[in-house]
């Protein structure tokens, strides 16, 4: 069984700028694969190659076994793309946008109308259906973009930074939609610079940096890959923080990180039994804990460990567009 | 390894064992898109342009004002000097303006195309299972609305000022038809510029530079090139806009047209044969 999404040793340069040095990724049917990385890491370039918009300099890629270079016509019948920039027509209404996509996909006028109405209702856009898209909010635009992408029932959906620029509520909405789409059997390739987004949605994460996949695995694997768990304690009474820190220090044998603003005490825990020891110690000293537990490192910490730098901007991802 | 840019290359052997035929989930996948479908898809894209104009009628403001302003200005500035009277000059000028407007009407296409590409609308088109050429052909056909508005205003306003046709209705129709065909051809040059320049403002500047010498260095404003210096006469003689203007003038006024309509058609075909494949190439590479 071939993978639904498969890319092997992709490279791509734009003039002197090397966008992709060597990228290989694969996703199985029904999975969400997240490409995680800062701006300019090459995520968009990968998506543009896989969605037949851009040719790689070398390497090969296929969707459901169809080569994106030589069988682009077939590939386009299987995929849908929602880009970083909402690719809907601002001057048309929501209804007209979906009617156009439906007609382009070969539906009859009546079918396209019906399907469009269905999608608008599903994405909570029925009330705005007759309004020009330029009057829509960012979240509504993104939802219409997703509706347009899902109109043709794609096998594989590419979401290029689907929540960039959205407010937190709209972000949660998009996450819900992505989960629905996957529940419907589609395979999703998602790019994101948000670590919590990859954590929330992805089955597999490929961490991309400077045009290379620097690590890949499930979110949990990535977290364990860079090391042990942390012991986290926060006293209910802020005045007790110093005593908590002392207890944690004695039990874990290393100096804990103490946050003055929150009173959170964190230290590496090599042995899960340390948690029980802390519980007993706090009990003995009659200190009430507001927060107490072991946790895996956050993807932020993962990123820092893997790449040696924090996951922040490194210039513009415009390189993916300026061919 | 370098890869080619056209769609149907047979480079890169694929290890996949699925050629055409049934795809995943029992889908039947097509391996090519036929001509009838290409036309239908192009018309859908053209429909989009028409809807845009319906929502924002101001988009037609330039093509409504331009012919009226040009007609009045040229008529009253040059009329007396060139032809003795404005009435006599109107007969020369109006058919000439049909040709001039057919040129100018193509300019906005490149600008709007460039804008569409920047906004990402064409990314969507390019990832859909439609013919590569459909979005471009559709954009050209969609601009027909602008051409029609322009010709309607020009003709209506000209008649109000006293222009009279001296030909059979079929000849008059042929005059506009010829102008339309030429316009469609020249549109592909505008498309080419829209695809090769990165900002809509630059598109406008570049368009002016090549349309001006072609438009004014022709028989558009003067039926006879006799008073021009030799080099300009030579330029006006080989200029396709002269062929169009002379054809339209002859067809509208019942005069001789000679081989001008044939030359116009030949030029149109030549422009399309060169510009269309170039535009498709740029399109595959750009975006």
Image (tube, coloured by chain):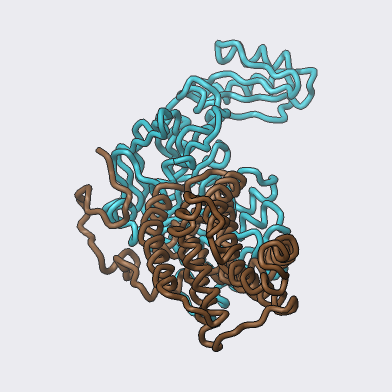
Q: Residue at x 51, y 59 (%)?
A: A181
The chain coloured cyan in the image: A
Q: Nearer the viewer, residue B32 or B220?
A: B220
Quadrant in the picture for the C terminus of chain A: top left
* Side of A47 relative to A148 (left or right): left
Q: Nearer the viewer, residue A155 or A165?
A: A165
**Relative to residue A140, is residue B259 depicted above or below?**
below
The chain coloured brown in the image: B
Q: Can you give x and y, in whole percent of width and height, for residue A82 in the image? A: 52, 53
Looking at the rendering, which quadrant does residue A11 occupy? top left
Q: Can you give x and y, in whole percent of width and height, for residue A19 in the image? A: 42, 33
Q: Can you give x and y, in whole percent of width and height, for residue B68 in the image? A: 72, 67
Q: Is residue A115 visible?
A: yes
Count of numbered badges drawn on the protein: 0
* Side of B218 relative to B282 (left or right): right
Q: Nearer the viewer, residue B174 or A73?
A: B174
Q: Is residue B64 visible?
A: no
Q: Can you give x and y, in whole percent of width and height, for residue B106 in the image? A: 55, 60
Looking at the rendering, which quadrant does residue B17 occupy? bottom left
Quadrant in the picture for the N terminus of chain A: bottom left
Q: Residue at x 56, y 66 (%)?
A: B223
Q: Residue at x 27, y 54 (%)?
A: A70
């Amino acid at each position: 069984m071939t993978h639904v999404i498969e890319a092997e040793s992709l490279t791509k340069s734009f003039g002197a700028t090397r966008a992709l040095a060597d990228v290989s990724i694969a996703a199985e049917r029904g999975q969400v694969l997240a490409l995680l990385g800062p701006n300019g890491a090459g995520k968009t370039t990968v998506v543009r190659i896989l969605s037949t918009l851009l040719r790689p300099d070398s390497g090969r890629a296929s969707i459901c076994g169809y080569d994106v270079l030589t069988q682009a016509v077939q590939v386009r019948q299987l995929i849908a793309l929602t880009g970083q920039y909402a690719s809907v027509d601002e001057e048309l209404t929501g209804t007209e946008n979906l009617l156009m996509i439906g007609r382009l996909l070969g539906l009859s006028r009546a079918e396209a109308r019906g399907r469009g109405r269905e999608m608008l209702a599903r994405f909570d856009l029925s009330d705005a259906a007759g309004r020009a898209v330029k009057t829509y909010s960012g979240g509504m635009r993104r939802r219409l973009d997703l509706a347009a992408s899902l109109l043709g029932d794609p096998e594989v959906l590419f979401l290029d930074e689907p929540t960039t620029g959205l407010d937190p509520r709209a972000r949660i909405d998009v996450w819900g939609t992505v989960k629905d789409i996957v529940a419907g059997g589609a395979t999703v390739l998602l790019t994101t610079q948000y670590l919590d987004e990859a954590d929330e949605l992805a089955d597999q994460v490929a961490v991309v940096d400077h045009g290379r996949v620097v690590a890949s695995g499930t979110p949990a694997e990535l977290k364990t890959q860079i090391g042990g768990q942390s012991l986290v304690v926060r006293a209910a009474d802020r005045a007790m923080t110093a005593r908590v820190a002392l207890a944690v220090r004695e039990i874990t044998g290393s100096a804990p990180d103490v946050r003055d603003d929150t009173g959170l005490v964190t230290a590496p825990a090599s042995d899960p039994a340390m948690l029980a020891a802390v519980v007993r110690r706090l009990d003995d000293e009659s200190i009430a804990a507001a927060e107490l537990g072991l946790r895996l490192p956050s993807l932020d910490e993962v990123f820092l460990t893997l790449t040696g730098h924090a996951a922040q901007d490194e210039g513009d991802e415009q390189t993916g567009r300026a061919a | 390894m370098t890869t080619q840019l056209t769609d149907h290359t047979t480079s890169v052997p694929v290890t996949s064992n699925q050629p055409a035929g049934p795809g995943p989930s029992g889908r039947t996948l097509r391996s090519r898109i036929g001509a009838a479908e290409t036309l239908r898809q192009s018309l859908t894209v053209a429909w989009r342009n028409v809807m845009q104009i319906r929502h924002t009628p101001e988009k037609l403001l330039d093509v409504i004002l331009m012919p009226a302003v040009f007609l009045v200005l040229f008529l009253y500035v040059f009329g007396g000097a060139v032809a003795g009277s404005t009435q006599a000059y109107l007969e020369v000028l109006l058919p000439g303006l049909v040709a001039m407007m057919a040129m100018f009407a193509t300019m906005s296409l490149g600008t709007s195309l460039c804008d569409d590409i920047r906004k990402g609308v064409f990314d969507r088109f390019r990832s859909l299972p439609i013919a590569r050429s459909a979005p471009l052909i559709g954009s050209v056909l969609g601009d027909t609305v602008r051409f029609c508005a322009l010709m309607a205003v020009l003709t209506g306003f000209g008649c109000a000022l006293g222009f009279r046709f001296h030909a059979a209705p079929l000849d008059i129709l042929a005059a506009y038809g010829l102008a339309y065909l030429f316009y469609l051809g020249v549109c592909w040059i505008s498309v080419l510029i829209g695809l090769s320049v990165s900002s809509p403002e630059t598109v406008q500047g570049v368009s002016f530079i090549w349309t001006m010498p072609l438009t004014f260095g022709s028989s558009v404003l003067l039926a006879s090139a006799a008073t021009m210096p030799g080099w300009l006469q030579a330029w006006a003689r080989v200029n396709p806009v002269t062929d169009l203007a002379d054809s339209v003038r002859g067809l509208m006024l019942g005069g001789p047209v000679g081989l001008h309509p044939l030359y116009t058609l030949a030029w149109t075909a030549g422009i399309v044969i060169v510009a269309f494949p170039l535009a498709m190439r740029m399109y595959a590479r750009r975006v």
